[in-house]
Amino acid sequence: MKVSERTSGVEYVIRDIISYARKYEDTGKPITYLNIGDPVRYGFNTPPHIKQALIAAVTNDQNYYAESEGAPELREAIVEKESQKGFSLCEGDVLVTNGVSEGLDMILASIVDPGTEVLMPGPHYPPYASYTKFYGGRPIEFKLYPDGRPDVEDVASKINSKSRAICIISPNNPTGEVFDRKGLQQIVDLASEHNLYVICDEIYDNIIFDEQFTGIGRVARDAPVILLNGFSKAYLMTGWRCGYLCLNARSRKLDSLRENVAKLARVRISSNLPVQLAAAQALRGPQDHIQDMVHKLRKRRDYVVKRLNAIDGVFCNLPRGAFYVFPKVDLHGRWRDDNEFVLNYFHSTGVLTVPGSGFGKKFGAGHFRIVYLPQISILEEAMNKLETFMSKSCK
Ligand SMILES: Cc1ncc(COP(=O)(O)O)c(C=O)c1O
C-alpha cells in the first residue's frame, strides 16, 4: 500500500536513534541516555502545585472539551507572562496548543506552499526542517557566530522571492546559543523589509545561565512576529503536551494568518483542558523550582564543557542557555561522518548521543549533541567513556 510522498522528508533524529538503542537493550548491557531533552526523565520532577492543579481539575469534572483557542484563564496568564517579556498581545492573540510542536506545525501549515523557502538557524531543532519539507517547502539554513549572533549578511543573501519566513530559536537547540538584542533586531528588520514572517521559539526562555534574556517582543514593534512557547521545559510538563503561540498584536500583516490558525485550531477541537488549567497554575504559582534547576544545570554545563574541551579531537563552545552541548569532533581518518561516530561511541560504551547532521546537514555535520540533564556522576562516567573511546580510536 502507498503512503504519501509528503512524509518522505520527515525525520526526527533525536528519537529516530532510539531504534539502535532497542536492539542494544536486547544484549542486556546498560544504556546511558544522553539523547532526549526531557528534564522529567532525569529527576527534575513536576512541581507539586502543578500536579495538584491537574488532579483538582480532573476531580472537579473539568474534563470536557476546552475552547479551541484555549482556556480563558490560561490565555490570561500567558498574556501576563509574555507582556512582561515585552511582547504586545491580548488574549485574542494567544492560541493554546498541544506543545510548541503543534504550534509550529500549525504555523508552517499556514504559511508554507510547495516550492517556498523557510530560513532557519544552522543548526536547528529538527521539526523546523521536517514540517517545512512536509508542506512542500525547503529549509534554508543560515549561519550563526559561535556567540549565537546571526550572520546577517548570510541571512540577507539567502532571502529571495520564494522566502516566506525567518525562524529564530533562542536559546537554540542543539547549541544552547542565545540571540542578543542586536541579532534579534537585525532579523526583525530584514523580515520587515522583505515581507517575511518571523517565527521565534522561546521555549527555553527561563533556562539562561550568564545574562538577562531578551525576548523577541522587545524589538518586534509592528513586525509580523509569531512567538512560540510552552510548558515542557521550565515547568517540567513534557509528557502533558502544552504550549502556545502568540501573534504580535501590533502587526496588521498577521491578519490572514490569524484567521487561518484559528481555523486549524477549531478542526482539531481543543487541547487538553485539565492540563491547561494546571498550566495556568504553573504560571501563577511559585517559580522557585526554576532557579534551583538553572543552578544545577549551570554546574552540569560547566563540568561537561570542561571535560569535553580536555579531550583530544573534541571542541565545545560554552552554551548560554537550555541543556545541550553541541561539540565538534575531529572525524578525520577515523569515522566517515557524525552518524558513524555516534553509533561507534554508542556500541563501544552504551552512551547514546545524537548525530549533529540531524540538526541540519550544513552546520550540524561533524558535531554531536549531548544532553547534560543527568547528575554529575552519570555525566562523569559518560565523559570518562568518551575520553577512553577517543584515545583508543587515535591508535
Ligand atoms: C527548540 C524547541 N522547540 C520545541 C520543542 C518541543 O516542545 P514541546 O514539548 O512543547 O512540543 C523542543 C523540544 O525539545 C525544542 O527544543
Image (cartoon, grey):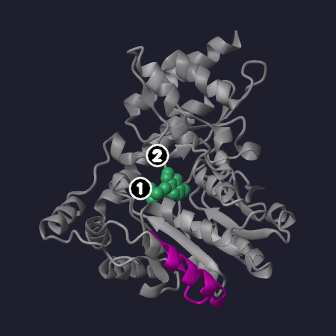
Cα distance in 3D space between marks 1 and 2: 8 Å
State the residue in front, 59 or 321: 59
Q: Is residue 383 magenta?
A: no
Tell me the residue that label 1 is attached to. 233
Q: Tell me: 190 left or right of 7.
A: right
Tell me the residue that label 2 is attached to. 37
State whether residue 51 is above or below residue 331: below
Q: Quadrant of the C terminus?
A: top right
How many residues crowd mark 2 within 10 Å: few (<14), some (14–19), many (20+)?
many
Q: Position of residue 233 (x, y in %)?
A: 41, 56
The CB of the residue at mark 2 lies under 8 Å from ligand 1: yes
How many residues crowd mark 1 within 10 Å: few (<14), some (14–19), many (20+)?
many
Q: Position of residue 93 (x, y in %)?
A: 49, 83
- What's the amino acid at mark 2? Gly
Residue 72 appears in which quarter of the rendering?
Answer: bottom left
Q: Is residue 248 magenta?
A: yes
User: For the residue labelled by badge 2, is the local secondary structure a helix, a strand or a loop?
Assistant: loop
Q: Position of residue 24 (x, y in %)?
A: 46, 20
Q: Could you say which disc has been placed on residue 123 in the image?
A: none
Furthest toward the left, the residue is: 59
State the residue in front, 263 or 250: 263
Residue 64 appears in which quarter of the rendering?
Answer: bottom left
The CB of the residue at mark 1 lies under 8 Å from ligand 1: yes
State whether residue 122 is above or below residue 393: below
How many discs appear? 2
Is mark 1 in CB contact (under 8 Å) with mark 2? yes
Q: Residue at x 44, y 61 (%)?
A: 99
Please tell me which of labels 1 and 2 falls first in the chain: 2
Q: Is residue 228 visible?
A: yes
Q: Which residues are magenta?
A: 244-264
